Amino acid sequence: MSLPRIVALTGAGVSAGSGVPTFRDAGGLWRQYRFQELATPQAFRRDPKLVWEFYDWRRQRMAHCRPNPAHETLAEMERVLPDFLLVTQNIDGLHAAAGSEQVVYLHGDIWTLRCTRCTYKERNRQAPLEPLPPSCPRCGALMRPDVVWFGESLDPHAIARAWEAFEQADIALVVGTSAVVYPAAQLPWLTHEKGGQVIEFNTQPTPLSDIATTILGPCEETLPHWWAEFQLKLEER
Ligand code: BV8
Ligand code: ZN
């Protein structure tokens, strides 16, 4: 019997164990309502310095964070399961730091800046960034974080690759996401509709809990545990 096709969707909860603040928990980012006001093209047009202060604050918070056992387990799955795919909503770079290479970044990368006018893009891990807001070294225009804001479209190739993988998956692992932001939150439903199994790793129920097997607890503990048990079952077959 061939290995099951497994895919994973992660959100801020996978990085909570690394000290990266999530959007929804109490100590979350500038409180939830501010986040949705700040992470928009309108806010950036109106006050680029304020939006950059928000991203610079997050970059400084993330700069010393290291991958946790949940990131490491997902990187190991990629090495063990031939057609494993990791899809993330996170922009913190911790999946790459843990060694994951086959990753679909739905919402971009906080460590990449791009020009608002020309095609210039750069990887930049400076924290704090000075001066704020940063300007393009090529044309002098304002630079922005290379992330997807609310109301902005996701990269169509990223969506197509994620969509296909979740439709074909036997098992969808949903790790540390409140599953309320679309189109990312649609992905586990695709697996479910095609008869696949959805397993969510969260510290509390989410809108997915109706169709998922929910494993409650911190994913930095529950995911490695699940993976160890899953591998034992594979060996017994
Ligand atoms: C789009 C990058 C087409 C930036 C982000 C009304 C209804 C439905 C949809 C919409 C609507 N109005 C508008 C929309 C569309 C909108 C949307 O979905 N809005 C929501 C709020 C309703 N979506 C969009 O705009 C998207 N684009 O639709 O394009 C289009 C084009 C033009 C015009 C119209 C439409 C773009 C969305 C992308 C936004 N960018 N991030 C940045 O990060 O700065 S979203 C950002 O928030 C994250 O990427 C993530 O997606 C989301 C936060 O969710 P989570 O990652 O899940 O984090 P959260 O804190 O919420 O939850 C953490 C979870 O972990 C919790 O469940 C917690 O219990 C758990 N947890 C905590 N600790 C642990 C843990 N679990 C396990 N272990 C732990 N230790
Ligand atoms: Zn430029």
Image (tube, helix red, strand yellow):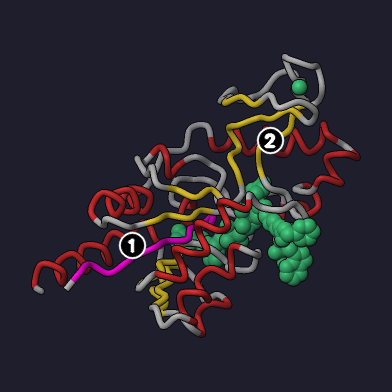
Q: Label 1 is placed on what type of residue?
A: Leu
Can you tell which of label 2 and label 1 is closer to the viewer?
2
Assess whether residue 5 is covered by the magenta stretch: yes
Pointer 2 local density, CA inside 10 Å: few below 14, some 14–19, many at least 20? many
Residue positioned 69% across, 30% down in the render = 114
Q: Quadrant of the C terminus?
A: bottom left
Residue furthest to the right in view is 46
Element assignment for label 2: strand
* Mark 2 sits near ligand 1, with its Cβ under 8 Å away: yes
Q: Is residue 40 left or right of residue 72?
A: right
Is 56 positioned to the left or the right of 226 in the image?
A: right
Question: Can the viewer see residue 112?
Answer: yes
Residue at image coords 50%, 56%: 161
Q: Nearer the viewer, residue 147 or 27?
A: 147
The magenta stretch spans residue 174 = no
Ligand 1 under 8 Å from disc 1 Cβ: no
Query: Residue 99: image x %, image y %?
Result: 34, 40
- Pointer 2 or 1: first along the chain: 2
Q: Which residue is mark 2?
A: 145
Q: Quadrant of the N terminus?
A: bottom left
Q: Return the mark for residue 223.
A: 1
Give the secondary structure at mark 1. helix
Which quadrant contains ligand 1? bottom right
Q: Is residue 51 above or below residue 167?
A: above
Range of magenta residues:
2-12
**Residue at horizontal 26%, vertical 49%?**
79
Q: Nearer the viewer, residue 235 or 223?
A: 235
Name the spot of residue 167 as percent of width and height, x first: 46, 71
| Residue at point 44%, 51% (across, down) | 17
In this view, 125 is above or below 164: above
Q: Position of residue 214 (x, y in %)?
A: 42, 77
